[in-house]
Amino acid sequence: MALISMRQLLDHAAEHGYGVPAFNVNNLEQMRAIMMAANKTDSPVIVQASAGARKYAGAPFLRRLMEGAAEEWPHIPIAVHQDHGTSPAVCQRSIQLGFTSVMMDGSLGEDGKTPMDYDYNMGVTRKTVEMAHACGVSVEGELGCLGSLESGEAGEEDGVGAAGKLSHDQMLTDPEEAAQFVKDTYCDALAIAIGTSHGAYKFTRPPTGDILAIDRIKEIHARIPDTHLVMHGSSSVPQEWLDIINQYGGEIPETYGVPVEEIAEGIRHGVRKVNVDTDLRLAATGSVRRFLAENPAEFDPRKFLKEALAGMYDVCVKRYEAFGTAGNASKIKPIKLEDMVPRYDSGELDPKVN
Ligand SMILES: O=C(CO)COP(=O)(O)O
Ligand SMILES: O=C[C@H](O)COP(=O)(O)O
Ligand SMILES: [Zn+2]
Ligand SMILES: [Zn+2]
């Protein structure tokens, strides 16, 4: 079974200059779509589960989904990551469950909503790193809060993210602070705030530099060249899927996501993990709406779920190709988690800070 640490996967991505989409998983169809697309394109995989996913599917089922993926596609390296952990204890339970990577999102408090200060964030992240690295598990931290530079609104969506108004400073990760944070915590990957937000309603117009700060990535990367940068809220919100949803009875107002070309520019400057959830939701919804509208007599869920899978598969293939992930699965030689431990202990994985 090729469940590997996210650190190993992202180190390979950094060495070879590509990015990896991290798709959120809640159910069988998403998992199969992601894996079938990875198999087709020879891409290594990051799948991630949120607190909402654990609530929806239940932790034992989620674990079995991931184990099932590794069993059916043993030649594909898979990092199993916990998305937006709200405390070291949550991260610890995920490690116990078999996750190979965790996110400690200390930019927000345990409620997942209240923006916290540097010292709190640094403390919980440092604690998580000590615990995770002792198990060979990697850690993603977050500095800055996701939110819209267009409206000043925080990124709350489906109960995830800060709520209310945020200042510009809170919504843009400071390169100086990022350098200090990496020095203080030794996290493997860092989620940065550059104007993206979760969900489908990111921008009211195609984003330009004033509302999507891709340039900020370059400044941060220059300070922490070994730390893998993570873009959250990076669905592209494909207009073709919005059109299909609305053509078949949906009511989604005009909205724009993060263009794939902007993500590719980020990848050229140190972004290695690109979080995508909403795009698969849109593809699944559009596919199901279309199928049921065109086949009103059908009632076998496998028929419409197969359509959902096909729509999501399509999005996954496009992202693996656009981010340069394709062609790399077969080049990675899996390192066991227990063999990551001495690598951390020896200091060979310590981050460089300029
Ligand atoms: O960041 C995400 C999960 O952590 C998902 O972002 P999207 O809502 O843009 O897909
Ligand atoms: O972090 C945001 C992801 O899109 C997960 O969303 P969720 O909490 O609804 O599962
Ligand atoms: Zn956050
Ligand atoms: Zn996120």
Image (cartoon, grey):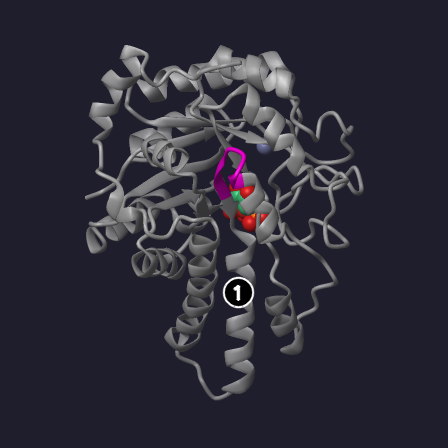
187 sits left or right of 61 in the view = right
Q: How many marks?
A: 1
Write down which quadrant ligand 2 falls in. top right
Image quarter of residue 42: bottom left
* Location of residue 344 in the rendering, given as x and y in whole percent from the top left corner: 30, 17
Residue drawn where x is 65% and y is 42% of the image: 197
Q: Is residue 112 visible?
A: no
For residue 154, above or below residue 107: below
Residue drawn where x is 43% and y is 52% of the image: 26
Mark 1, residues whose alpha carbon is within 10 Å: few (<14), some, or many (≥20)? many
For residue 171, above or below residue 185: below
Numbered disc 1: secondary structure: helix
83 sits left or right of 192 in the view = left
Residue 272 lies in the magenta stretch: yes
Residue drawn where x is 34% and y is 51% of the image: 43
Residue 295 lies in the magenta stretch: no
Q: Is residue 298 visible?
A: yes
Q: Which residue is mark 1?
A: 283
Viewer-closest of 52 and 167: 167
Q: Quadrant of the N terminus?
A: top left
State which region is magenta: 267-274
Ligand 1 contact, mark 1 (Cβ < 8 Å) = no
Q: Looking at the picture, which amino acid does disc 1 mark?
A: Ala
* Location of residue 244 in the rendering, given as x and y in whole percent from the top left corner: 61, 73
* Location of residue 317 in the rendering, given as x and y in whole percent from the top left corner: 42, 60
Viewer-closest of 20 and 253: 20
Residue drawn where x is 21% and y is 50% of the image: 75
- Extreme-bottom residue of the structure: 297
* Location of residue 334 in the rendering, given as x and y in whole percent from the top left corner: 22, 37
Viewer-closest of 301 and 341: 341
Viewer-closest of 111 and 304: 304
